Image (cartoon, rainbow, N blue to C red):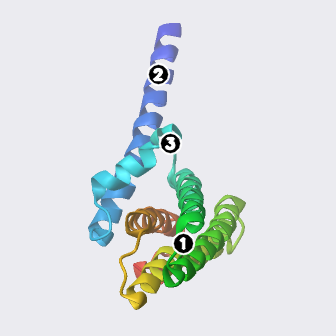
Amino acid sequence: MKLLQATVSLVFLLACSTSNASVLHDACQSFAAIRHKDADYNYCVRFFQADKESATADHRGLAVIGAKLIEATAKSTGSLIATMLTSEKDKEKLGCLVACGKGYLDAMDEIGKAAKGIVSRKDGGVEDAVTALGGALDAPLDCEDGFQKLHKPSPLAAEDARFRKEASITLFVTGTLLPQINSSKLGI
């Protein structure tokens, strides 16, 4: 009898683990089907696997993990911008870098709001999180637009592309928490 109980418990734990692991893969497959131009399935999986908790996370857990990961990316990009500011001599590029730095500071604030909305479980919390993540996506877009207007190559092109991909994934997964998901509401 004890062997049977132990076996049933083990099967239950494996089923839970497998179903949570499939949450990650299902989320990334759905993302890739809708948003393939920014990041593919493999990029999405690698993004989440940067946090070992993603293997057992549900959709809300993936959204929280995504917010944590993009906050780190925004912070890293902000640090890079601060370093660039100390050596940039071109006044136009300097102005762009300052604007980019401000954009990433704003993005970090928006990501913080999003994280609170995701974990709040209150009515409107997820909607607020989706709105905040949409605002965070402005940072790389505005940064690249600034350099394009100057007709100068962006020294942050790779970082902006990475943040855009990661924030898009996080926005998508967070949007799956909405009661009636409509991808047009997510800006994707």
Q: Earlier in the sequence, mark 3 or mark 2?
A: 2
**Which disc is residue 10 wearing?**
2
Indicate whether 127 appears above or below 74.
Answer: below
Select label 3 or label 2 by which is in front: 3
Q: The C terminus is located in which quarter?
A: bottom left
Q: Residues within 10 Å of mark 2 (few under 14, many from 20)?
A: few
Relative placement, left or right, of 78 versus 169 is right
Q: Earlier in the sequence, mark 1 or mark 2?
A: 2
In the picture as drawn, the residue positioned furthest to the bottom comes out as: 149
Select label 3 or label 1 by which is in front: 3
Q: Estimate the x, y position of residue 187 in percent, counting from the top left.
A: 44, 81
Nearer to us in this view, 44 or 31: 44
Dots 1 and 2: beta carbons under 8 Å?
Answer: no
Indicate whether 28 appears above or below 102.
Answer: above
- Local secondary structure at mark 3: loop
Tag 3 residue: 51
Give, as a three-letter code, the residue at label 3. Asp
Relative placement, left or right, of 63 versus 168 is right
The residue that appears at 49% across and 63% down in the rendered structure is: 170
Report how far apart the C-alphas of labels 3 and 1 lie in the structure: 26 Å
Report how far apart the C-alphas of labels 1 and 2 lie in the structure: 33 Å
Nearer to us in this view, 148 or 23: 148
- Local secondary structure at mark 2: helix
